[in-house]
Amino acid sequence: MELKQVLTDIARAIVDNPDAVNVVETVDGDDVELVLTVAEGDTGMVIGRHGRIAKAIRQVMKAAANTCGKHVTVEIK
């Protein structure tokens, strides 16, 4: 499973400007770090009220990474 693509698809479904979504992946063994960058006006949509959407995105990504036997961290910029 391609974790980078999963995060990209989730983010593009949420934001108003899906072309500005960018995900940078850094792999170190079983640890995967994903850095999500969106347009400045879409940052609030990805984070949500009190960080609820960001937390939900991280939970979905951890579940997806679990199926691959990896550990993922998601950072939103």
Image: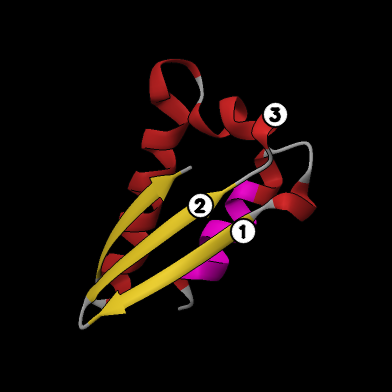
Q: Which residue is mark 3?
A: 41
| Labelled pair 1, 2 in contact (Cβ < 8 Å) | yes
In the rendered image, residue 54, in percent from the top left (x then y), is placed at 43, 35
- In the figure, is residue 22 to the left or right of 26? right
Q: Amino acid at mark 3?
A: Gly
Q: Quadrant location of residue 42?
A: top right
> In the rendered view, would you say 45 is above or below 73?
above
Q: CA distance from mark 3 to mark 2?
A: 14 Å
The residues colored magenta run 4-11
- In the figure, is residue 20 to the left or right of 67? right
**10 Å crowding of disc 2: few (<14), some (14-19), many (20+):** many
| Quarter of the figure with the N terminus | bottom left
**10 Å crowding of disc 3: few (<14), some (14-19), many (20+):** few
Circle count: 3
In the rendered image, residue 32, in percent from the top left (x then y), is placed at 30, 70
Q: Which residue is mark 1?
A: 22
Q: Residue at (21%, 78%) from the top-left corner? A: 30
